[in-house]
Image: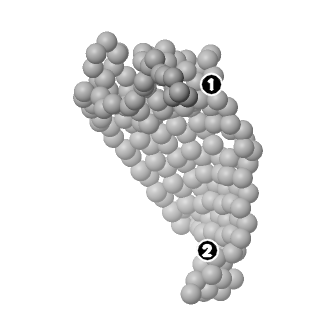
């Protein structure tokens, strides 16, 4: 046909018929200033989010959870902070969630549950210049996507830990 491509199937995204999303979140922050001496600069941070969602795509497609919405996420951090030094060790968790909705639930693409550890530190040399160092994904947790269930992986991205070292200058 004169070099023209002929397609027998066209796939395009469409909006679903209806979706609901509800949930709750809690946060806890505690400065441990009741501890003696330098330990009084320690702090504890915690947050947790729980969501419940349902997306209706119409037609014969089964309902599912809302794409991009993990049912549970949380963070826990321990920090040490003075006027010069800040150091933080953090853990973040997230349940699996749908990334891409397929023709049916067996074709849905999910992001695997995540459990990551990070460390960050900064030191104020003066009121203008700060040195910093961040180590992200310390335990080298891969980004894993699967189709339908975890026994059918479609992508695994392994980046290793990310280390950032630098300076910040305030004008």
Measured as percent of width and height from the top left, residue 45 is found at: 51, 54
- Residue at 29% in and 28% down: 16
Asked whether 2 or 108 is in front, the reply is 2
Q: Is residue 42 above or below residue 162?
A: below
The reply, left or right, for residue 131 in relation to residue 147 is right
Asked whether 64 or 2 is in front, the reply is 2
Q: Is residue 40 visible?
A: yes
Residue closest to the far front? 2
Give the SS element for disc 2: loop
Measured as percent of width and height from the top left, residue 133 is found at: 71, 65
Alpha-carbon span between mark 2 and mark 1: 46 Å
Q: Earlier in the sequence, mark 2 or mark 1?
A: 2
| Mark 2 or 1, closer to the camera | 1
Q: Is residue 49 above or below residue 9?
A: below
Residue under pointer 2: 82
Label pair 2/1, CB-CB below 8 angstroms: no
The reply, left or right, for residue 134 in relation to residue 45 is right
- Residue at 35% in and 15% down: 62
Query: How many callouts does the rendering have?
Result: 2
- Residue at 60% in and 78% down: 83
Q: Is residue 44 above or below residue 169?
A: above
Measured as percent of width and height from the top left, residue 97 is found at: 48, 30
- Residue at 27% in and 20% down: 58
Q: Which part of the image, by quadrant, shows the C terminus?
A: bottom right
Number of the label disc, if any, that sits on residue 154: 1
Q: Quadrant of residue 92?
A: top right
């Amino acid at each position: 046909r004169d070099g023209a491509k002929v397609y027998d199937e066209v796939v395009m995204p469409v909006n679903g018929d209806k979706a609901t999303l509800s949930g709750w979140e809690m946060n806890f922050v505690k400065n441990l200033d009741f501890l003696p001496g330098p330990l009084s600069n320690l702090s504890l941070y915690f947050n947790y989010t729980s969501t419940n969602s349902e997306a209706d795509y119409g037609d014969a497609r089964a309902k599912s959870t809302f794409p991009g919405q993990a049912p549970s996420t949380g963070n826990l951090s321990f920090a040490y902070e003075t006027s010069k030094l800040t150091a933080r060790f953090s853990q973040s968790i997230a349940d699996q969630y749908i990334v891409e909705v397929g023709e049916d639930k067996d074709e849905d693409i999910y992001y695997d549950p995540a459990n990551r550890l990070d460390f960050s530190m900064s030191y104020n040399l003066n009121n203008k210049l700060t040195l910093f160092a961040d180590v992200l994904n310390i335990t080298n947790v891969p980004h894993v996507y699967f189709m339908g269930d975890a026994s059918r992986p479609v992508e695994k991205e392994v980046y290793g830990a990310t280390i950032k070292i630098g300076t910040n200058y305030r004008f």
